[in-house]
Image (tube, rainbow, N blue to C red):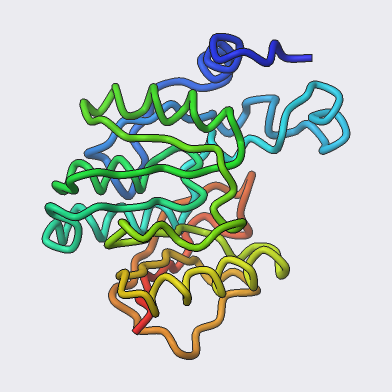
Amino acid sequence: MIEPTPQGRRDFVLANTRPQRPPHTPELELCLADEITPIWRLTEEALEEMGLPPPFWAFAWAGGQALARYLLDHPQVVAGKRVVDFATGSGIVAIAAMKAGAARVLAADIDLYCEAAVEMNAAANRVCVDFTDQNLLDQPPPAWAEIILAGDICYEKPLAERVLAWLAVARAAGATVLIGDPGRSYFPREGLTKLAEYQVPTTRELEDMEVKKTAVWAMP
C-alpha cells in the first residue's frame, strides 16, 4: 500500500517518472513514465492492492498534447482568461494555458496523485496552477470559468456522455469549450468545430499506433 499522504504521493511520482519533454510540446518539461516503467504493466487488480488508481498522470496523452500545442501556438485564446482544465492528468494542458498567458488555471482531477504531479510539473515550468480533486461533474460548471479545456476524455462511453453533457452546459452558459481528442471510440464529431489537426507521436505501449492523428475541437 502506498502511503496516502501528500509526501507519499509525491515520492511515488518521483520514483516512477523522470523529467521529460513531450514530443509534441518540447517547450514543456513534465515528470513522465518511461515506456518500460513497471507501473504501466501492472493490472488493475495489482494497482488496487497498492491503493493506486490507474496512473494517467504519468503519460502525456495525445489529446492533451494536441490541446497544449494549440494553446501554445494560439496564446490569444486563453491570454488573460480564467480557465478550467478538466481531468488534468499530468497537468500538461493547464501548464500550457498558463504559459500562454491565462490569468488563472484550475486543474481538476479526482486522482490525488495528479495533485502531486501537477504541482511538480507546474514548478518545473515556472508557472502556478491551482488544483482541485472535487468531481466537477457533480455540480454545475464553475460560473467564473471563461474557458474549459478537456483532453482525451472520450475513452469510456458513460464518462464521455457525462462529460460532454457537462461541457454543453458550460458552453450554453457562455464559456468557450475546447476538446483534444485522438479519435477515441466515443468522441462525437458531429456538432463540433475542428480548429486544428496534428500528428502526435505516442507509444505502442499505450496506444494502437506510434503516431495518432489528433484534433482540437470547439463546441460552437
Residue 216 drawn above or below residue 141 = below
Relative depth, front residue between 10 and 132: 132
Residue 160 appears left or right of 124: right
Give the residue displayed 25% in from the left and 52% down from the top: 82
Q: Position of residue 217 (x, y in %)?
A: 37, 74
Give the residue displayed 60% in from the left and 49% down from the top: 204
Give the residue displayed 29% in from the left and 23% down from the top: 124
Residue 31, quarter of the rendered image:
top left
Give the residue displayed 56% in from the left and 42% down from the top: 134
Residue 2 drawn above or below residue 178 = above
Q: Quadrant of the C terminus?
A: bottom left
Q: Position of residue 74 (x, y in %)?
A: 15, 61
Residue 8 appears left or right of 24: right
Residue 98, quarter of the rendered image:
top left
Q: Position of residue 53 (x, y in %)?
A: 71, 35
Q: Position of residue 71 (x, y in %)?
A: 23, 57
Residue 38 drawn above or below residue 23 = above
Residue 48 drawn above or below residue 211 = above
